[in-house]
Image (cartoon, grey):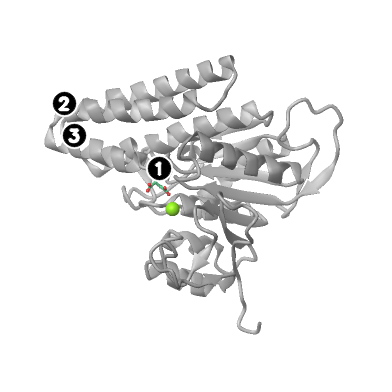
Amino acid sequence: MTKELLVTKQNGFMNDCDTETATKPLLVMKFGGTSVGGPIPIARTTSIIERYTREGNSLVVVASAIKGVTDSLVGIGKCIQDGKRLELELGLEDIFYRHLDVANNLNLSHPLKTSLNTRIEELFFELYQYASELRGLTSEKSDRILSYGERLSIRIVQAKLLSRGLVAETVDATEIIETDDNFGQASPDIEKTARYARDLLLPMVTDGVIPIVTGFIGSTRYRKTTTLGRGGSDYTASILGKVLDADEVWIWTDVDGVYSADPRKEPNAQFIPELSQVRAHQMAMAGARVLYPKTIEPLMGTGIDLWVKNTFNPDAAGTRVYYKTDSK
Ligand code: ASP
Ligand code: MG
């Protein structure tokens, strides 16, 4: 697979009349929980996707669950563990209405809104049936429950993209990221993931469709849902960047990039415009909040740059994480 894809359509947009042949850079863009945290952030996120698509890039989008939803799903797991049926029902209802509330405030056309609401109801019903069996919590059951945050959020992002005239398809990462069975902290099988991800995503991209992939989750060879660890959507993006041989991976978050300390707590924190993969990996492993610790690993030694950018200040330069050879 070459780095640049041969794209025979104007990528990502409906009503293409003329076909053009062009090579386009492939960017994997991941949007975190705050970037999909409500109607306004979702409007920003989708305008960023639209902008970079219009500027002539092919995009693969990875989305996290809506901010706070994974924590609430952890709470659902706790109710199952403790056999608390009433709290479980209330918790599930709250998660359901949080999604419906976002969906109903996206300014969608009636048909789009109706089909999104139906999809949310279906997914929610599945979650409800699974969670209300109670009977104890295993790490396997917990992962399946946690996966619904991303399963729900990608549908919402897709609907908003469709309403802007873009062509987007949802992709459940359980179809493309194969992991071991270390539930809660699963590791990907890169070779198999490369095969599945290329087979499913590259034809979409070539056809001018923007795949919207669930962050955070994968599945075992026996198709049991796994999670990559809390905050793991960044890792999903870098895994996909690696296996698709993307040009760049962009992590969209709610700060301007990487700082020497948490800028919200430490007013003297210094912005870092560029850092090597080794340094970024060290910082993430040492607890820098901005990147999931394993994010850099799949990209180590590749020429694939990773950028950390701010959804709420998209014109800020962001931080570039790059591969530096010893000789440089
Ligand atoms: N939704 C997951 C979490 O909250 C993954 C992520 O946000 O990256 O941990
Ligand atoms: Mg994060």
Residue on which disc 3 sits:
80
Residue on which disc 2 sits:
86
* Percent position of residue 195, x then y: 57, 46
Residue occupying the point 65% across, 66% down: 303
Type of the residue with mark 3:
Ile
Observer-nearest of 175 and 108 = 108
Label 2 vs label 1: CA separation?
24 Å
Mark 3 or mark 1: which is in front?
1
* Percent position of residue 139, x then y: 25, 44
Q: Earlier in the sequence, mark 2 or mark 3?
A: 3
Indicate which disc residue 118 carries: none
Task: Look at the numbered disc 1 and give the secondary structure of its residue.
Answer: loop
Position of 279 relative to 17 (above/below) = below
* Percent position of residue 268, x then y: 45, 73
Q: Quadrant of the C terminus?
A: bottom right
Q: Disc 3 vs disc 1: Cβ atoms closer than 8 Å?
A: no
Type of the residue with mark 2:
Leu
Residue on which disc 1 sits:
67
Position of 327 relative to 113 (above/below) = below
Task: Look at the numbered disc 3 and give the secondary structure of its residue.
Answer: helix
Query: Would you identify the image quadrant in which residue 299 lies?
Result: bottom right
How many residues crowd around disc 1 within 10 Å: few (fewer than 14), some, or many (20 or more)?
Answer: some
How many residues crowd around disc 2 within 10 Å: few (fewer than 14), some, or many (20 or more)?
Answer: few
